[in-house]
Image (spheres, rainbow, N blue to C red):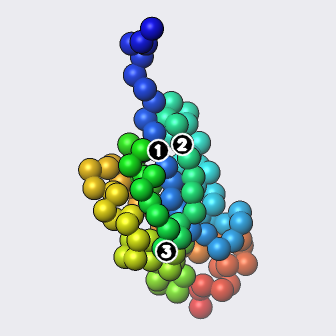
């Protein structure tokens, strides 16, 4: 029997983060939670510069996320876009990008401000 219900949107968050629990991780969790609350099926996967991204074709929405270190986007996300087949597999997909700058820790204010 075939259901008349629509299939949930399939979304994947591809990200890079060198720390656990930092700004990037918090954004990933918040975005994933909101998408799931709206009924989407959500997966998360870390970016690797030379990975095979053929699996991206299985998703309707691709969200790319990474931290910015010293005014440069993380090397794994940049590498994935330049060195792998990620860009090719994003064709025809809905794509969103988020970048995280700074630390959620109060001490970061003294590190980033003169």
Mark with earlier residue (3, 2)? 2
SS at circle 1 = strand
How many numbered markers are drawn? 3
- The quadrant the C terminus occupies is bottom right
Q: Quadrant of residue 3?
A: top left
- Please say if the residues under marks 2 and 1 sit with CB atoms less than 8 Å apart: yes
| Horizontal relation, residue 109 to residue 34: left or right | right
Q: Is residue 1 above or below residue 60?
A: above
Measure the alpha-carbon separation of dots 3 and 2.
22 Å
> What residue is at 33 percent from the left and 65 percent from the top?
87
Measure the alpha-carbon separation of dots 3 and 1.
20 Å
Residue extending furthest bottom? 114
Residue with the mark numbered 3: 49
Q: Quadrant of residue 36?
A: top right
Residue with the mark numbered 2: 42
Q: Residues within 10 Å of mark 1 (few under 14, many from 20)?
A: many
> What residue is at 50 percent from the left and 59 percent from the top?
14
Image x and y of residue 95, in percent:
36, 54
Residue with the mark numbered 1: 11
SS at circle 3 = loop
Image x and y of residue 37, in percent:
55, 33
Question: In this view of the protein, can residue 68 be seen by the observer?
Answer: no
């Amino acid at each position: 029997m075939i259901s008349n219900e629509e299939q949930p949107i399939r979304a994947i968050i591809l990200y890079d983060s060198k720390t656990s629990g930092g700004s990037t991780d918090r954004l990933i969790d918040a975005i994933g939670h909101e998408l799931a609350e709206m009924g989407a099926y959500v997966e998360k996967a870390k970016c690797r510069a030379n990975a095979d991204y053929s699996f991206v074709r299985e998703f309707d929405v691709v969200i790319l996320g990474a931290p910015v270190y010293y005014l440069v986007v993380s090397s794994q996300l940049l590498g994935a876009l330049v060195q792998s087949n990620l860009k090719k597999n994003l064709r025809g997909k809905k794509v969103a990008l988020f970048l995280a700058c700074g630390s959620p820790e109060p001490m970061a204010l003294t590190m980033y401000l003169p």
